[in-house]
Structures are given as structure tokens and as C-alpha cells.
Image: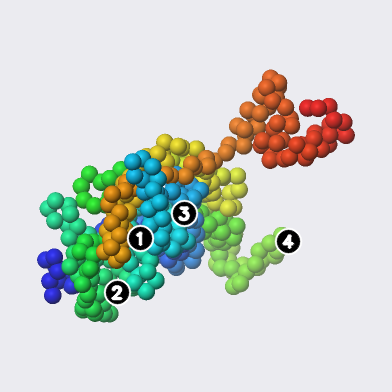
């Protein structure tokens, strides 16, 4: 069977390309598969650690990928955008159809997951379907790791293949939905086939800060994944070296009794082959330049931080804990504005697909209305030190009072603020 010039096995193999692997790794790191993926990384003959299992090195993992993405200008942490249909610049009652056939909580979770997926992989696809039993829309998030789009010479989608399970797939063309199954040896067979009553491929594309120059989606940027693996590798080596430093290796030029334990006041009888030999018994440990390692990782961390508009601060105060990274969010409105623009286009296309399905299923024509999307105002991270300094200046210059500070910053009521001022003044209310 041939679909868009590919047989069934060739279609499935499209999901095994370089971008697909990179996306699966990035998603795995983000969702918590750090241990398994780091283990595979350490096994790599070029990037990993030679004989790390024989040396009993324990993989140490930090999910720096999740920490960075979750603090990197996400759009919907503070709520979903508001959608409306307008006519002659006025919101119309037809707006009800936007949410009429949507499970709000499912839609909310999908949009928030879409946001993180786009931030991580730079592009994602929202597949929109219709559940005939529930009478509602369905939403699935696709990306390089689980889907592939075949397009014509004018970049119009002709065929979409996406993974629906470990060994199951769906192929969507303008005419049909095909369900495929791959067996254990890689053979692919057709399981079912049904008409595509929509007459089009119901998808909307979302991009991070801009649309790709060519093609439907951006290639996957591996910089964050590479950094996460390098960090895990260095943490593992550092943990191994510190354990070695705490439990030194014993060196000697004579035969020592088996199961020897040395300590304060120990007396050891040795077998000396030559009476004139200078006997030495010495514990030795590796010479670890932790500062150099930390400097290298810090420089790399700063490069990654700049790319994702976050601040990475290294905490090296405790050597036994290894290299610690603290991720802090920047108050970057410009980043959110950059990310908002392509999402507006994505939501507009999403509604175009939804309205076409509503017309097919319910014979309701909504083409006369204009779709409008309003994004929630972001709550920016607060620099507490800066806030305290600003209020100190305002109070010193008599442009504000301590009571103003307690009510605005600490959220106290007027009575609570008065009581706190009396407490601060040793029981005297001076009206501050």
C-alpha cells in the first residue's frame, strides 16, 4: 500500500529521523527520564565515561532542563488566554461556540503543555479532533518526536503521520484516516481505514518566537540537552572522586595482611622481602580541582541561560554536594511579547479548524465573525531586595510611611499594620 509516495514501513520510518531522536531525548529529560537517558549517555564511547560501571560510578542527575524551561517566559502560568468572536468590533454572543464543545480542564492542561513543548522544542503541532460520543473537541500535542508532516512543493500539508502508542500509528490525509501497527521485527500493517469527513488535515502549528524560514517546524535545538548531559556527567565524576577522596586507596611496596584496617594506634606486621628496603605504607587520593570544573560549568551555564532568558547562579559553597545550579526567572516582558505573536497566529489557525468542524458537524456557519485572543497579563518575578531598597528610600524621603509598606508589600489590613507598628516601636504608636 502506497500513501503519498511511501509504503507503510517507510511512513513509520519517518518518525525515526535525527530530529525525532533529539526531540524524544529533550522531552525525556524534561519529563523525568533523566536516569535512563544519562545511563545511555555514559555508555556512549565518545561522550560517556569509559568503564564507568566497573569503576562503580553512580549516575547523578539534575533536571536542569525542567528548571530552565519552567522559568523561561512561559505564557500560560497565570491563566489561559481569553477567546472571543467579534462583529463590527463588538464581542458577539456567538463567542459561546468557542467553549461550547470544549472540556475546559482538558483544554487548559493541553495548552499549558503546548506552551512548555514549544519552549523546549521550538515548534509543536496541535491536532484537533472530534469525539462523536462526547460531542466535544479533542486536542493532542504533536512534535518532531512523535509526528511527521509530508507537504507538497508549496508547503501545504498532504499527509500527517503520528504515533498513537508504542507500536501504533495514525496516518491522516485529506481523504482518509489510516491506523497502522508495527510488529516486533519492524513489519507494518494496516489495521483500519475510514473516511476523513473533514476533508482536510485538522492541525495548527505553534512556534516559539518566530516561524521557521522553511518547512513546517523548527529543527530541534540540542544545546539544553547537551548541557544537561554534561552536567550529569560531571556530577557523577565529582561524586565518584569525592567518595574516593574520603575513602583513600592504600599503596605500599610490601605485602600487607589481607583485610587490613589502618587507623590511629594501629600496629601492622609486614612481610619484608629485603631487610634493607625502605618500607612505605601510604594512603593516596585524587587531586581534584573543583574550582576549575565549576568555572567551566558556570561559563557553559551562562551561555545556556542567555539563550533561554533565565539566570543560572552557581552555588559552590558546599563541596560535598557538588556543583549546584539555582535557576531564577528574569522579569522579561519582551520575551513574552516575542512568544505571544506566533501563538496568536497558532490560535487563529486553531479556531479556523474548529469552526470548520463545527460547520460540518452542527451546520453552524461562524465565518462572518472575527476571532480575537487576549493573553493574560504576566505576573513577573519579584526581586525582594530591590523592593526593600525602594521602600526604604520612599520612607526616608517621607514619600511613604511604614504603614503604607506593611499594607502594600506585606498585605496587612489597616488594623494589622497599626498593631505591627506598635510592636516595632516597643509598644508605642508614633503614627508612622
Locate the C terminus and report the quarter of the image it occupies: top right
Q: Are marks 1 and 4 in contact (CB under 8 Å)?
A: no
Q: Position of residue 182 (x, y in %)?
A: 25, 77
Residue tagged 3: 66
Asked whether residue 373 appears in the rendered view, the answer is no
Tell me which label, 1 or 4, sits earlier in the chain: 1
Residue 26, picture quadrant: bottom left
Tell me which label, 3 or 2, sits earlier in the chain: 3
Say which residue appears at 70% left-offset and 65% top-offset.
267
Tell me which label, 4 or 2, sits earlier in the chain: 2
Q: Give the Cα distance between marks 3 and 2.
A: 28 Å
Q: What kind of element bears circle 4? A: loop
Q: Are marks 4 and 3 in contact (CB under 8 Å)?
A: no
Residue tagged 1: 141
Q: What kind of element bears circle 2? A: strand
Q: Position of residue 392 (x, y in %)?
A: 68, 27
Can you say whether 1 is above or below 316 in the image? Answer: below
Q: Are marks 3 and 2 in contact (CB under 8 Å)?
A: no
Q: 35 or 53: which is nearer to us?
A: 35
Q: Give the Cα distance between marks 4 and 2.
A: 69 Å
Residue tagged 2: 168
Residue tagged 4: 265
Q: Position of residue 293 (x, y in %)?
A: 47, 46
Q: 127 or 189: which is nearer to us?
A: 127
Amino acid at each position: 500500500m502506497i500513501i503519498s509516495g511511501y509504503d507503510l514501513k517507510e511512513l513509520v520510518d519517518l518518525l525515526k529521523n535525527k530530529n525525532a531522536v533529539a526531540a524524544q531525548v529533550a522531552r525525556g529529560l524534561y519529563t523525568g527520564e533523566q536516569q535512563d537517558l544519562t545511563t545511555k549517555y555514559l555508555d556512549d564511547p565518545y561522550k560517556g565515561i569509559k568503564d564507568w560501571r566497573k569503576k562503580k560510578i553512580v549516575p547523578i542527575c539534575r533536571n536542569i532542563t525542567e528548571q530552565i524551561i519552567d522559568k523561561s517566559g512561559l505564557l500560560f502560568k497565570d491563566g489561559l488566554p481569553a477567546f472571543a468572536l467579534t462583529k463590527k468590533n463588538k464581542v458577539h454572543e456567538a463567542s459561546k461556540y468557542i467553549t461550547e464543545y470544549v472540556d475546559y480542564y482538558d483544554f487548559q492542561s493541553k495548552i499549558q503543555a503546548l506552551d512548555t513543548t514549544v519552549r523546549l522544542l521550538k515548534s509543536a503541532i496541535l491536532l484537533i479532533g472530534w469525539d462523536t460520543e462526547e460531542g466535544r473537541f479533542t486536542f493532542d500535542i504533536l512534535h518532531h518526536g512523535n509526528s511527521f508532516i509530508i507537504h507538497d512543493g508549496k508547503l501545504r500539508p498532504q499527509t500527517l503521520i503520528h504515533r498513537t502508542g508504542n507500536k501504533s500509528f495514525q496516518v491522516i490525509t485529506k481523504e482518509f484516516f489510516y491506523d497502522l501497527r508495527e510488529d516486533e521485527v519492524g513489519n507494518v500493517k494496516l489495521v483500519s481505514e475510514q473516511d476523513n469527513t473533514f476533508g482536510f488535515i485538522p492541525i495548527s502549528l505553534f512556534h516559539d518566537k518566530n516561524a521557521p524560514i522553511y518547512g513546517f517546524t523548527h529543527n530541534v535545538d540540542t544545546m539544553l540537552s547537551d548541557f544537561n548531559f554534561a552536567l550529569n556527567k560531571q556530577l557523577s565524576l565529582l561524586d565518584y572522586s569525592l567518595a574516593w577522596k574520603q575513602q583513600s586507596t592504600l599503596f605500599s611496596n610490601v605485602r600487607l595482611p589481607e583485610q587490613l584496617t589502618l587507623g590511629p594506634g594501629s600496629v601492622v606486621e609486614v612481610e619484608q622481602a629485603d631487610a634493607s628496603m625502605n618500607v612505605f605504607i601510604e594512603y593516596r587520593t585524587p587531586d581534584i580541582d573543583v574550582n576549575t570544573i565549576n568555572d567551566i560549568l558556570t561559563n557553559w551555564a551562562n551561555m545556556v541561560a542567555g539563550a533561554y532568558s533565565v539566570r543560572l547562579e552557581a552555588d559552590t559553597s558546599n563541596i560535598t554536594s557538588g556543583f549546584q545550579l539555582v535557576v531564577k526567572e528574569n522579569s522579561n516582558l519582551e520575551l513574552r511579547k516575542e512568544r505571544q505573536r506566533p501563538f496568536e497566529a497558532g490560535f487563529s489557525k486553531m479556531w479556523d479548524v474548529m469552526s470548520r468542524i463545527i460547520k460540518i458537524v452542527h451546520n453552524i456557519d461562524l465565518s462572518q465573525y472575527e476571532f480575537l485572543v487576549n493573553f493574560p497579563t504576566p505576573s513577573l518575578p519579584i526581586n525582594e531586595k530591590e523592593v526593600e531598597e525602594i521602600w526604604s528610600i520612599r520612607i526616608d524621603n517621607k514619600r511613604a510611611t511604614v504603614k503604607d509598606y506593611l499594607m502594600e508589600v506585606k498585605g496587612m489590613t489597616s488594623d494589622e499594620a497599626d498593631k505591627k507598628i506598635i510592636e516595632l516601636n516597643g509598644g508605642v504608636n508614633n503614627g508612622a
